[in-house]
Structures are given as C-alpha cells and as structure tokens.
Amino acid sequence: MNIQVKPIRTRSEQRLFLTFPWRIYRGDPLWVPPLLPERKAMLDPRRGTFFRRGGEAELFIAWRDGEPVGTICAAADHALNRLLARREGMWGFWECIDDYAVAAALFDRAAQWCRERGLETMVGPFHLDREAGYGILIAGRDRPPALLCGHTPPYYLTLVERYGFIPARGDNLAFAIDITQDTPPFQRLARIAERVRRRGEIVVRSPDMLHWRDEAERLFIVINRALAHLIDFVPWTHEEFIALLRSFRRVADPDLILIAEADGQVVGWFPGLPNLNEVLIHVNGLRHPWDYVRLWWYGRQQPHCLAIKSVLILPEYWNTGVAVLLFDEMLRRARAKGYTWIDLSLTSEDNPYTPTLATRMGAVLYKRYRVFKLKL
C-alpha cells in the first residue's frame, strides 16, 4: 500500500491535522485532549510565539489509500540555533497509527525537511514551545497527566527506537506527593523551615499582581540563572517568558505563587497552579459549542492536584534553606485550599537537585518521559 506524506495547504487539511489525535486516542481514558483554539493559535505563523521570534515549521499529513494515518511537524528555531552555534531541527505533533511503515514515512519526510535547511540533528517530540506535552511517555499509565504533561500510546516508543532515534538526554520525571497526611518527612520539613524563618534572612511572599510586569522582570533574571546548570539547557527568551507568565496569570492563584527574597532581591520562585487537566479531560478540546458548557461546569469544581512545574532557586542559595522554606509554605497553603496531592513535573533526570529534594519530601516517581535525537 502506497503511503504519501504531504504538507498541509488548505484550511480543511489544517483542521484534519489539528483533530487527528482524536483518531489515535479514541477510547483512551488517560488522554487529555489539547485545547483546539490554543493549538491553532500556536501553529498560526501570524500569532504563534515560535514564528514571531523567527522560527520556521511545516506541517505534514501521512495518507494511505485516501485515509489520513499520521501527522508530523518539522521545525527549526533559527534564532536559537544561531545563538547556540548549532544546526538542530525539531519534530513534534507526531501522531501515528500502529504501523512502522507509516511512522518511517513521517520521520523520513521530517528528516528531509531538516536536511534541506542544512540541519545536522533532529530532536523531539516538541510542540514548538518545548514546554507543553513533550517527550514520549515511557512509564506511568495509572493516571492522566498533569498540566503541561503529555500522554502517548505504548507503541510509540517501539516505533521511535526502531527508526534509530536515541535518547537526547536524561529522562524527564514527574513526581507525586500525597499531602493529606502529616508524615515524618513533612514534620521534619516544618522543623527545619521554622529554624530558617527565625534567622530572618529569607522572606517568602506572593507576587504583586497589580505590578506583575515588574515581577516578571525580576523572575526572568532568576529563571535562566537557576536552570543554567542543566545539560543542554536552552535559555528562555524574554518574549517567551513573558508569554508564559501571561498564560499563568489567567489561571494562577496568587497565594500559590511563591517568591523568595534575600536582602530585597528575588532568589527563588516556586509557582503552583491548579491542575487544569482535571477539567480539560472532560471538555473534548473545545471542539464543539456544547463543550464550553462542560468547561463551565467542571471549572467550578475544586481540583485535587496542585501542579508545580519548577523549583527555581539561584545556585548560590541552594544550601541556605530557601527550598525548604518554599516547600513548607506551599504545603501549608495548598492544604488550606483543599488540595490533596502535589504534582512536581517535569524535572530532568540530569538535574542534581530537584529529584533528590522531591524524594526526601516523600514524593514518588509516577511518570517518565523521554526526548529523542537523530543524527542526520
């Protein structure tokens, strides 16, 4: 059977590309459908942050006997490649039936696209912004993913490895912490945090939402310095970071966005967000008008999970008690608001700090994701 991989050219093809995941995940109770309005904006060259900073991408659909059987996006972040003096392409939005011939045809086309632009490697899966739903799910199929984490069928790993992809770095990990019980690790945390508080050197506060732009500038200084130690860390651009905070601002509870200061300077940031996936799993990606009614209904309910995406602390403050103080304060506030567990995701297996800290808190590893690379 002949497989053809063609670039999308029409609105109907774009719609098919966007909705194709529903064909793959039909009947999967763990899948959280992406919000179509957001995904459409992300892929719009006029609106998407990736394109506004000079990125290039093309979308493809695989066809067999007139039926769509897979999708892929090939992309290049030219500005970042120049900054890091590298020639790296990306692949993402990869969805595929359980057929190696289809997967190979999609990867062949993305690789060809990258070679035509002089790129030397192809890394993925990424959804252009590198922060939402990336990687292949390796382990952890007992519950739906938390906010900004992805979900893939078990056979995806086999297809990717058979093609020749190898791990690009250490796996990305998601930890879960049950906060309903006052466990010995929590009691020890509280004792240590109290000693740090008494010293009076570190102050923990919520952000000033009336002056959030000023807060954003302070936090931008922290994020790149706090993550610079990670292998293959890609610095955030100012525009990307402001866009991220803008999206956070729409859903965040200021009481659960913690900022640590020392001598009046921001030295740490600990953002907690309601796990909106508990709502989004019910709203079908807002494909139809009635899905907005579901959004209203489920949006009124208190989430069980608080999602914490990063523990950002300046390296010179790693061993000063800042992390302990932030964790203890977050635990107190999350319990008071009715949360029952905390998601810590995603942190890199290569990170020498966060996985150890999470484990000491009594967290358990519940999902593992892997990003792959291919030499062209």
Image (cartoon, rainbow, N blue to C red):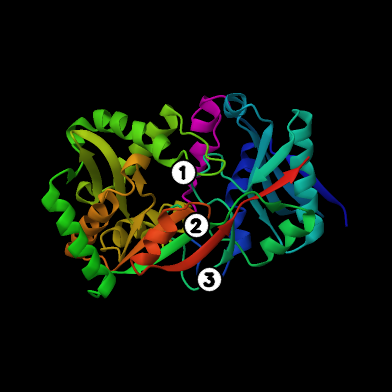
Q: Is residue 35 magenta?
A: yes
Q: Which residue bears the numbered disc 2?
A: 33
Q: Amino acid at mark 2?
A: Pro
Left or right of 351 on screen, residue 108: right
Residue 99 pos. (x, y %): 77, 62
- Mark yes or no: residue 337 visible: no
How packed mark 1 is, by other alpha carbons closer than 10 Å (few <14, some 14-19, many 20 or more), is few
**N-term mark: 3 or 2:** 2
Q: Which residue bears the numbered disc 1?
A: 37
Q: Which mark is residue 239?
A: none
Residue depicted at x 77% and y 50%: 63
Left or right of 214 on screen, residue 149: right
Which quadrant of the view contains residue 158?
bottom right
Image position of 165 with respect to 248: above or below: below
Closest to the camera, between mark 3 and mark 1, is 3
Image position of 336 with respect to 48: above or below: below
Q: Amino acid at mark 3?
A: Arg
Residue 3 versus residue 319: which sits nearer the camera? 319
Residue 181 versus residue 97: which sits nearer the camera? 181
SS state under label 2: loop
Region rendered in magenta: 33-54
SS state under label 1: helix
Q: CA distance from mark 3 to mark 1?
A: 27 Å
Q: Which residue bears the numbered disc 3?
A: 141
Closest to the camera, between mark 2 and mark 1, is 2
SS state under label 3: loop
